[in-house]
Image (spheres, rainbow, N blue to C red):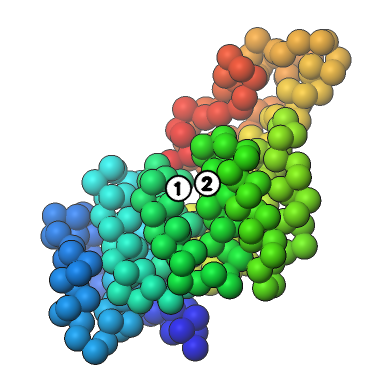
Amino acid sequence: MRCLIGLICLFLSAWINTKVEWNLKEWTTSPLPRPESALLLSAEFPPLSSDYFLMKAAIFYSGMAKFKKTESLWLSKALYLASYLDPYYFEPYWMAGVSLPWEGRLQEAKKILKRGLNYLNNRWEIPFYLGFISFYFEHDNKVAANYFLMASKLPNAPTYLPLLASRLAVKGRETRIAIAFLQEQLKMTKEKKIRGRLKKRLKALQAISFLERAVERYKEIYGHLPLELNSLIKQNIISTIPEDPYGGSFYLTEDGRIWSTSNLR
């Protein structure tokens, strides 16, 4: 029932967003209440207050094209507030896991998700998000593997999780795992604007994966990394370098990774 209410809130937020012209930047200048104070003011209805702050966070997230530090901090506080007011409500944890890490708010995302471990210990998604943060953003394979194994033992967990945990140390898997992560989130996301953000990031990661495979092919042929991505075109390994949907340019780092000047933001 609460999942249904959460989805209704997200749909409602999308509808409101089309009817009302929000001055979203003003929201970050209006401080959110302290969690303890919000709980006290909610009286007998903290779940409704949780819905309110989640809806507000969803409108804010879907309405911003690019986040500044103060804006991503506001989003993380709003999601923490929603999870605090109703710790058994899954949607704030889901939104924290799917949005905050990509905006550079790793510690805030982990704080919310670790809270979720205590209250929703039957949801595989929560340790899965923590494992993905540890692996993709913090490059800590050991911690990530533990979280993925934890997730694999919970009800309805995808069958690939134990295999994923065992392959974390394999070189070149980071982008492919990130793609699988985003594809999983798209299955769970109904709100149109949030789906658009996920698809945009997925497109960028697919371009990176394409270039990574081309670099691997170059190294197989010539025994060393190319000096630049244009070398892949010159040697007829690829015909063109894909565009970054965020407006940046892909490049090859000194350690052979593919990244973009946009930082995918």
Can see residue 202? no
- Point 65% across, 53% down: residue: 148
- Point 65% across, 28% down: residue: 241
Query: Most extreme residue toward the right, as rendered?
Result: 221
Q: What amino acid type is highlighted by mark number 2?
A: Ile
- Point 28% across, 42% down: residue: 69
Which numbered disc covers residue 213?
Answer: none
Is residue 9 shown left or right of residue 160? left
- Point 63% across, 49% down: residue: 146
Measure the C-alpha gap from mark 2 to mark 1: 7 Å
Q: Nearer the viewer, mark 2 or mark 1?
A: 2
Q: Are the two marked residues, 2 and 1, in contact with CB atoms closer than 8 angstroms?
A: yes
Q: What amino acid type is highlighted by mark number 1?
A: Pro
Q: Is residue 179 above or below residue 225?
A: below
Q: Is residue 97 above or below residue 178?
A: below
Is residue 56 shown left or right of residue 166? left
Along the line of sight, the residue nearer the viewer: 134 or 227: 134
Task: Identify the secondary structure beneath mark 1.
Answer: helix
Q: Is residue 112 above or below residue 52?
A: above
Q: Residue 156 occupies which quadrant of the picture?
A: bottom right
Neighbours of disc 2 within 10 Å: few (<14), some (14-19), many (20+)? many
Can see residue 187? yes
User: Could you tell me residue 14's position as x and y percent?
Assistant: 39, 73
Is residue 87 shown left or right of residue 230? left
Task: Identify the secondary structure beneath mark 2.
Answer: helix
User: Could you tell me residue 47's position as x and y percent?
Assistant: 33, 82
Q: Is residue 145 above or below residue 51?
A: above
Neighbours of disc 1 within 10 Å: few (<14), some (14-19), many (20+)? many
Instruction: Determine which residue is flagged by label 2.
Output: 133
Instruction: Determine which residue is flagged by label 1.
Output: 101
User: Could you tell me residue 158's position as x and y percent?
Assistant: 72, 64
Quarter of the image with the C terminus is top left
